[in-house]
Image: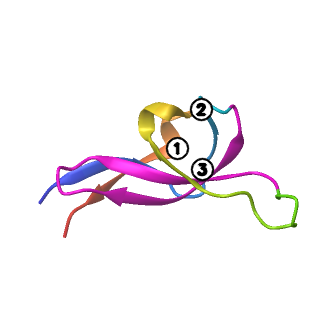
Amino acid sequence: MKRFKTIKLGTVCVDKATRLQGTVTHCAINMGGKVNYFFQPKGLDENGQPVRKLFLELERLEIQALRDFENINEK
């Protein structure tokens, strides 16, 4: 069984590149074990719809505390 350290879903953080604040909504683990995240920036676009999600790696997200991480097991 393989374990992965991931950001807890629902964690509020900042994208280092755009400086947008938002929430981690989903994670995806590829065949090589690399974890990436869907990041929903805060706010609405000009049509009143949520801003488009970004698909980011951990290194691009500013995480405030170790409690924002969890370990998950592969089944």
How far is the residue under mark 3 from the one under mark 1? 6 Å
Relative side of 3 to 44, left or right? left
Kindly report the distance in space between the C-alpha atoms of the residues bearing marks 2 and 1: 7 Å
Q: Is residue 31 left or right of residue 41?
A: left
Image quadrant in which you'd find residue 53: bottom right
Q: Which residues are magenta?
A: 19-43
Q: Quadrant of the N terminus?
A: bottom left
Q: For the residues marked 3 and 2, what is the alpha-carbon distance in whole angstroms?
A: 9 Å
The amino acid type, in three-letter code, at marker 2 is Gln
The image quadrant where one finds the C terminus is bottom left
Q: Amino acid at mark 3?
A: Thr
Predominant secondary structure in magenta?
strand
Location of mark 1 (residue): 68
Instruction: Indicate the position of residue 48 as horizontal and vertical percent values.
Output: 87, 66
Q: Secondary structure at mark 3?
A: loop
Within-10-Å neighbours for mark 2: few <14, some 14–19, many 20+:
few
Whether residue 45 is situated above or below residue 21 in the rendered picture: below
- Label 3: few (<14), some (14–19) or many (≥20) C-alpha neighbours in 10 Å: some
SS under mark 1? helix
Query: Which label is found at residue 64?
Result: 2
